[in-house]
Image (cartoon, grey):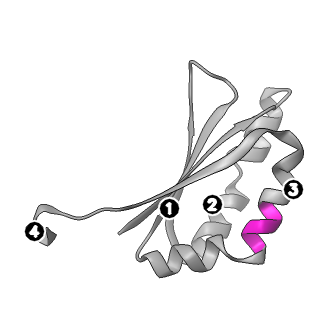
Amino acid sequence: MWFHLTNIRLYLPNEDTIDNTLHSQAFVDLIIEHGGRASYVLECPDNPTAFTFLTVWDTKADADDFFTSDTYHDFIQKMSPQFIAPPCEHEFEAMTAAEV
């Protein structure tokens, strides 16, 4: 299983924008439509501008296909006016003890 984390800092002027921008079912559907298993948004209670998008994939190739797609780049471009800092992306492979 493959995890992709994207840490972002956003200026979001009100709660409605947070719900519409980050907790959109459309974004979850987009990830699933492109082969993802799940998508979560982690909010930092100590820093209201810090968010982490966690997406789960069966393979690295599935994640790479999405994160190099025009669809993803269009999403990032659409959000870029609200960025306080550029996104920081990390990838992790999850293995069970039996797989090690």
Q: CA distance from mark 2 to mark 1?
A: 7 Å
Look at the image and say whether residue 74 sits in the magenta stretch.
yes
Question: Who is closer to the viewer here, 9 or 38?
Answer: 9
Q: Type of residue at label 1? A: Ala
Q: CA distance from mark 4 to mark 3?
A: 42 Å
Instruction: Name the spot of residue 74 as percent of width and height, x first.
Output: 82, 66
Secondary element type, mark 4? helix
Which quadrant would residue 29 be assigned to in this image? bottom right
Reading the image, the residue beneath label 2 is: 28
Q: Which mark is residue 38?
A: 1
| Residue drawn at the location 63% of the way across and 75% of the way down | 66
Q: Type of residue at label 3? A: Lys
Label 3 neighbourhood size at 10 Å, few (<14), some (14-19), many (20+)? few
Reading the image, the residue beneath label 3 is: 78
Q: Using the image, determine if residue 15 lies above or below residue 64.
A: above
Q: CA distance from mark 3 to mark 1?
A: 22 Å
Question: Who is closer to the viewer here, 4 or 89?
Answer: 89
Q: Which residues are magenta?
A: 71-75
Label 1 neighbourhood size at 10 Å, few (<14), some (14-19), many (20+)? some
Q: Taken as a whole, is the magenta stretch helix, strand or loop?
A: helix
Which quadrant would residue 59 be assigned to in this image? bottom left
Reading the image, the residue beneath label 4 is: 98
Q: CA distance from mark 2 to mark 3?
A: 16 Å
| Residue drawn at the location 78% of the way across and 28% of the way down | 15
Instruction: Return the disc, 2 or 3, that comes first in the chain's sequence.
Output: 2
